Image: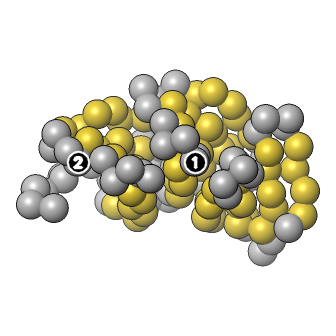
Amino acid sequence: LNKSYDDHSCGVAFVVWSPDDRYVLVCGTEECSELWIWDVENKILRKRVSNNHDDSLTSAAWMPDGQTFVCGGIKGNFYVCDMDGNIKETWEGVRIRSLQTLPDSTVLAADNLKRIRCYNFKDITDFNL
């Protein structure tokens, strides 16, 4: 990278590259309700994502398709979003610390209850790891 990406309204707490290395998701601190999608190839901010000013978007992970991602934080919601920032699915009541996706699109979420749970957004089920 030979560019500074500095258009964040909050501090930066988390960064994750897309599967094709073209985009970067950037999450802020616990007080931040925004997430930024940077187009690294074109060196521009593609989208600033914010659903609710009360959200905390501190973690994110790309879905295997590279066109959607999950994001969430400690205030109790996490989302599946597309590249335009549109929310495709929502899961409420989960205080997210960290997210990861598996090749089958299952989402692993570490939460504030000291557990890792699996979430399947295709059939809206959750289960223990």
**Label 2–label 1 contact, CB within 8 A:** no
Residue furthest out toward the left: 2
Q: Position of residue 46 (x, y in %)?
A: 28, 34
Q: Of 10 and 22, which appears nearest the observer?
A: 22
Tell me the residue that label 2 is attached to. Answer: 40
Q: Position of residue 40 (x, y in %)?
A: 23, 48
Instruction: Please tell me how crowded label 1 is: few (under 14), some (14-19), or many (20+) other residues with Cα within 10 Å.
Output: some
Disc 1 secondary structure class: loop
The quadrant of the picture occupied by the N terminus is bottom left
Name the residue type under label 1.
Pro
Q: Residue at x 70, y 66 (%)?
A: 110
Q: Residue at x 87, y 50 (%)?
A: 126
Is residue 37 left or right of 99 when viewed as pictured? left
Q: Residue at x 18, y 53 (%)?
A: 5
Q: Residue at x 69, y 31 (%)?
A: 89
Instruction: Please tell me how crowded label 2 is: few (under 14), some (14-19), or many (20+) other residues with Cα within 10 Å.
Output: some
Depth check, mark 2 against mark 1: the one in front is 1
Disc 2 secondary structure class: loop
Q: Position of residue 28 (x, y in %)?
A: 40, 55
C-alpha distance separating marks 2 and 1: 19 Å
The answer to whether residue 121 is visible is yes
Tell me the residue that label 1 is attached to. Answer: 64
Location of residue 19 with respect to 37 vertically, above or below: below
